[in-house]
Amino acid sequence: MSENERIIGIDLGTSNSAACVYIDGKATIVPSAEGATVYGKAFPSYVAFTEDGDLLVGEPAKKQAITNPENTIKAIKRKMGSDYTVEIQGKEYTPQQISAFILQKIKRDTEAFLGEEISKAVITVPAYFDDNQRTATKDAGKIAGLDVLRLLNEPTAASLAYGLNKNSDEHINILVFDMGGGTLDVTIMEFGDEIFEVRATSGNTQLGGKDMDFALKKYLADEFEQEHGVNLLDDPQADMRLEEAAERAKIELSNTVETEINLPFIAMDSDGQALNLITTINRSKLETLVEEIVKRGGETIQRALDDAVMTSEDIDKVILVGGPTRMPIVQEYVELYLAKKVERGIDPMECVAQGAAIQAGVIDGVIGDLILVDVTPLSLGTEVADGSTSVIIPRNTAIPVKKSEIYSTVHDNQTGVNVNVVQGERKMADDNSQLGSFLLNGIPPAPRGVPQIEITYEIDADGILNVTAKELSTGVNQSIIIDASMKMSDSEIERAIKEANEYAEQDEKKYRLAQLRNDADSAIYAAEKFIFDPEFRDQIPPSDIDRIENLIVELKQAVSDEDVVQITVKTKELNDATTEIGASFY
């Protein structure tokens, strides 16, 4: 590509965002127009409107948030892909529009930094983002005037930032510990022969740096109330000032052993006198406050290891991503849990953007071929007649991927089938997330089981799903329509995995009953077809017809009673009787 078509990498984050470009053989972070902040070259993902209607993005928006909270938006990334809107000064904005303001700032800052126009980008997204969230991210880019050439999973980007520096011919396993403001993602990847393959990914949507901020904020508020009898958390402005101070102290204590918190005139006493909060906090005290929060990260690490069928001994490299991982206590805990030293040399706040820039360089042709293989976080399948889920793409399958299965009708002369697409790890379709459904009509009338219906699931490199059903004899086909029913949040994905483990035994029983019902239905269908067949009906002794009809009644009763033992016994008896009587005609 020519110079004026350079592609940038963007880390569109919940708390902070950053851009990066590949220049002279290395990924270079684009400085924000306002200069470096406490977060480094990244800038806070804040958007605000002043009383005059002026738009503020980044550090200026965050600085005025205390005095203008009703016109300030933060963490909009959590709402991507939803119907949520925010009303500012009488006008409604979608998450895509708010995110577009952030992307427009990145576009402007990059153009000023490079002195050239920018119109193409690679944007990173959480590994757990579903189809709606990914599409919304692309839409935000389009609104901002950017052609989003690729969506790249954040842990993949982080691994990429480190992976290009490894010149080993051996395959290595990389664990990415990505802790942001509100979430923790752990991803295990294999790297070798210039190929990245995600082996497993696990997350906790209720664990992040904000939990640590709150722990310190609560401690400071309690100390203040004990001394002055005033609860700062009851006052929104005081609460926000305290939260900002706690976050700043947490960040500063990553590089120093002690820091001062100075908040003058933060409250008034009962006599109307101004009260100040001035105190010193040391790293040791902060670590005591957040220790239990940090330890919760071990559960997410272990889930990822279990899903990848690995132990800590199988991990060769450990990468830390996100601001909270700058904290010594986080680094030490991860190293202790895995018995491995973490990789250093790249700022955890910048490596995702750097990885995006490297992927942009691959697309741009300035970096040699590098293959990235992500995975789907939950299994995808189709609901079948017995109510169970027929999995077509298992969880942690590498994407892009295209897989097909052949199904058929369950009734004679059936001319249409409903294709219900589900996502999750439960055996029964109703227990999984319903992504959407569509009707395939035009199936030629035929006995049940004869028509051949091919259902294809295809996930592209951005993790976007397309489902097609095709009747093979006629070629008639239909595809799913992606609509609001496709929404699935990070927490829902996390809960789906947890519930699948909790209800494994119960699900197995329900699945077993469904399979037995299916077997019973097939036995009843075959028996009734046989005894009512005009070719044989008059030749079957009445006693044999009575015998089969009685067995059918008994089997139907067993199914109605959900009696697993009797269903098994009566299905066998009916099949044996039908086979025995039928054999006399051949």
Image (cartoon, rainbow, N blue to C red):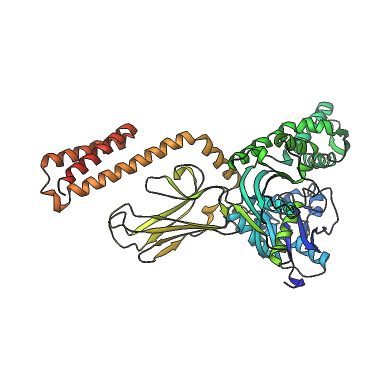
Say if 512 sits above or below 61 in the image.
above
Q: Is residue 101 visible?
A: no
Nearer to the camera, 244 or 427: 427
Nearer to the camera, 193 or 26: 193
Nearer to the camera, 307 or 121: 307
Question: Count of labels shown?
Answer: 0
Left or right of 233? Residue 153 is: left
**Residue 343 pos. (x, y %):** 77, 45
Left or right of 395? Residue 279 is: right
Quarter the N terminus occupies: bottom right
Left or right of 76? Residue 536 is: left
**Residue 428 pos. (x, y %):** 44, 43
Nearer to the camera, 504 or 218: 504
**Residue 476 pos. (x, y %):** 39, 65
Say if 456 sits above or below 14 in the image.
below
Q: Residue furthest front?
A: 169
Left or right of 453? Residue 39 is: right
**Residue 147 pos. (x, y %):** 67, 66
Say if 484 sits above or below 282 in the image.
below
The image quadrant of residue 521 is top left
Q: Residue furthest top?
A: 226
Q: Is residue 517 visible?
A: yes
The image quadrant of residue 104 is bottom right
Residue drawn where x is 67% and y is 38% of the image? 313
